[in-house]
Image: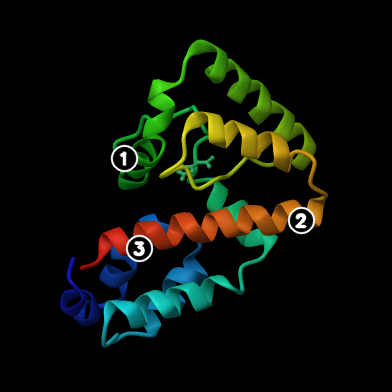
């Protein structure tokens, strides 16, 4: 969708047009309320600014839309399609890497009580596993901050690809 169209849409339709970026309604609503944007750069700056207020409650909300790494979403909706694209590198994972990622995901969920989240686009399976193992050593506060940063990256990448 181009920016002119996005600027002119009624609020409900505009929110629907960016809803796949992140499942945080407050962020979606604040972004569309900041329209019209004079440029894509201005839109991206506002979108990033609005991510700064996210909390661990927002993280929990958003995680519902992110399948585990290595468990690619099977659904037909837009989020599932994006997730499959983002996690494409896991398609090349051998059995050992797949098993190690499953064990890592389980250990992470037992430790932090939520799904391990990482911006998958541009990362190999090995790299994601190494990050998972490193982050398992984090304390709760550090890990919540890292997970939120990954959520920001995923959200802004999705937004950038949604508008021209
Ligand atoms: C994902 C996903 O679906 N896309 C991405 O970049 N990361 N999931 C995850 N658990 O990190």
Gap in angstroms between the C-alphas marked 3 and 1: 15 Å
The C terminus lies in quadrant: bottom left
In front of the other: label 1 or label 2?
2
- Residue for badge 2: 142
Mark nearer the N terminus (3 vs 1): 1
Mark nearer the N terminus (3 vs 2): 2
- Residue for badge 3: 159
Provide residue 34's location: percent of width, then percent of height. Answer: 39, 85
Other residues around mark 2 within 10 Å, as few (<14) / some (14–19) / many (≥20): few
Residue under the point 26% across and 88% down: 38
Q: Is residue 119 left or right of residue 52?
A: left
Give the SS element for disc 3.
Answer: helix
Classify mark 2 as within 8 Å of ligand 1 or not, answering yes or no. Answer: no
Provide residue 51's location: percent of width, then percent of height. Answer: 54, 70
Q: Above or below — where is 13 with respect to 147?
A: below
Residue under the point 73% across and 29% down: 107
Residue under the point 49% across and 43% down: 66
The N terminus lies in quadrant: bottom left
Other residues around mark 1 within 10 Å, as few (<14) / some (14–19) / many (≥20): some
Give the SS element for disc 1.
Answer: helix
- Residue for badge 1: 81
Residue under the point 56% across and 36% down: 128
In front of the other: label 3 or label 2?
2
Provide residue 2's location: percent of width, then percent of height. Answer: 17, 71
Q: Quadrant of residue 102?
A: top right
Mark nearer the N terminus (1 vs 2): 1
Gap in angstroms between the C-alphas marked 3 and 2: 26 Å
For this orientation, the residue located farthest to the right is 139
């Amino acid at each position: 969708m181009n920016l002119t169209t996005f600027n002119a849409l009624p609020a409900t339709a505009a929110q629907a047009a960016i809803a796949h970026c992140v499942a945080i309604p407050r962020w979606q609503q604040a972004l569309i309320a900041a329209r019209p944007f004079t440029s894509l750069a201005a839109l991206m700056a506002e979108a990033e600014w609005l991510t700064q207020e996210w909390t661990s409650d927002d993280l929990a909300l958003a995680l519902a839309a992110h399948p585990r790494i290595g468990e690619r979403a099977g659904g037909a909706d837009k989020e599932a399609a994006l997730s499959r694209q983002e996690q494409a590198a896991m398609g090349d994972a051998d059995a050992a890497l797949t098993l190690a990622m499953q064990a890592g995901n389980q250990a992470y969920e037992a430790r932090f009580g939520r799904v391990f989240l990482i911006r998958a686009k541009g990362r190999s399976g090995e790299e994601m596993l190494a990050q998972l193992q490193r982050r398992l050593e984090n304390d709760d506060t550090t890990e919540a901050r890292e997970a939120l940063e990954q959520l920001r990256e995923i959200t802004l990448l999705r937004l950038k690809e949604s508008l021209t």
